[in-house]
Amino acid sequence: MPTPSRFSPRAHALLVLALVLALGLSVPAAVSWGAAAIPVADTARFLWAALTGGTIPASDFTDYTVVLQIRTPRVLLAAVVGAGLSVLGLAAQAMVRNPLADPFILGVSSGAAVGASAVVSWGLFSALGGLALNAAAFLGALLASVLVYALSRGPGGVAPVRLILTGVVLSFGFQALMSAIVFFDAKGDAARTVMFWMLGSLGAATWEQLPLPALTTALCLGWLGWRSRDLDTLAMGDGSAASLGVDPDRMRVQLFVLTVLGTVALVSVAGTIGFVGLVVPHATRILLGPAHRRATVVAPLAGALFMVWVDLVSRVAVPPRELPLGVVTALVGVPVFVVLVRRAGYVFGGSR
């Protein structure tokens, strides 16, 4: 049986409240700070004018445009992506019963990289204009995931070990294909563009990009919360799950579909951002215990807060250039994860 949480209901509620307050304060702060700082009071005034249809002086038009059209959608997208990757990390770890899993184990990121490199090098989907890269990454990630599922499914269903191994092996194959596309690029500038995208970036964030990842994240979070008891049962092992009325293979297929669709939606707009979907769910389980009901509340809030600050650091660390988000998450995630692993005090589920 999963070990109980060390947090009382009151402590859990206080933790959630603290995360909500921290996120609520961090978003306007991140919108205000950047290569050109804008006072928080002015930022609040601009946002209020946009929400209420108010007017602003002509002298503030430039700052107003920066706040409303550039920084606000970017910060909100960072929060959505952080929350989404954390939720999908919970789903991926539950699917394969392994706390070291993340949403990218299914070959999604490598497949998306192939699609992105094809756009940069060959000009595919050029008719879509600025959405060409997103569309190609979405399609490449989706096709890669379907291939992983088809090859990992056996007569007895989808075994976690086979799924992981298939995803890892095919990821190497997709990475090789991406490298070949970039290597033979006639223009010679594809490598930098694709590499920056693979490490994650929100530099092209717009209001139009927000609805899809936000809706996907909300749906994934709602489904995981609804099936949290079944996820706890699945973590005990397939035999125990079946004896308690949960079909492990069917549940695993549902988790696969959920993880793939959610990750594809996020990767297509933000690229590959490592460690968020691994470290945040892992830290949440260590703090709260392996039960999913509380984790599905805390993990997305923690992930959103983390990504808002990661994006801010990427913008202000080496102005006027930006660091890829994956660089910042790795610099933070590697030492944090090492500490977490050495202090881990729980066992993730049972054995099959």
Image (cartoon, rainbow, N blue to C red):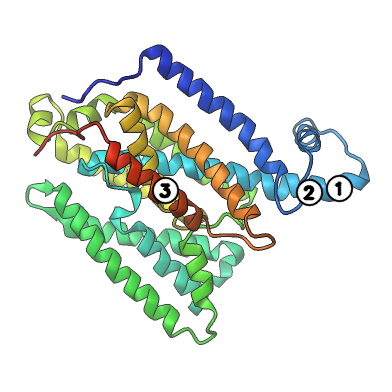
Can residue 124 be seen from the camera position used here? no
Where disc 1 sits, the SS reads: helix
Mark 3 is surrounded, within 10 Å at the Cα level, by few (under 14), some (14 to 19) or many (20 or more) other residues, namely some
Q: Is residue 128 left or right of residue 236?
A: right
Between disc 2 and disc 3, whose residue precedes?
Answer: 2
Residue 115's quadrant in the figure?
bottom left
Residue 173 x %, y %: 28, 70
Q: Say what amino acid the circle numbered 3 marks.
A: Gly
**What is the spatial separation of the Cα atoms under label 2 and label 3, in whole angstroms?**
34 Å
Please state which of residues 328 and 203 is positioned toward the viewer in this rendering.
Answer: 328
Q: Are marks 3 and 1 in contact (CB under 8 Å)?
A: no
Q: Are marks 1 and 2 in contact (CB under 8 Å)?
A: yes
| Pointer 1 residue | 61
| Pointer 2 residue | 65
Residue 55 x %, y %: 88, 36
Where disc 2 sits, the SS reads: helix
Q: Say what amino acid the circle numbered 2 marks.
A: Thr
Q: Is residue 245 left or right of residue 224?
A: left
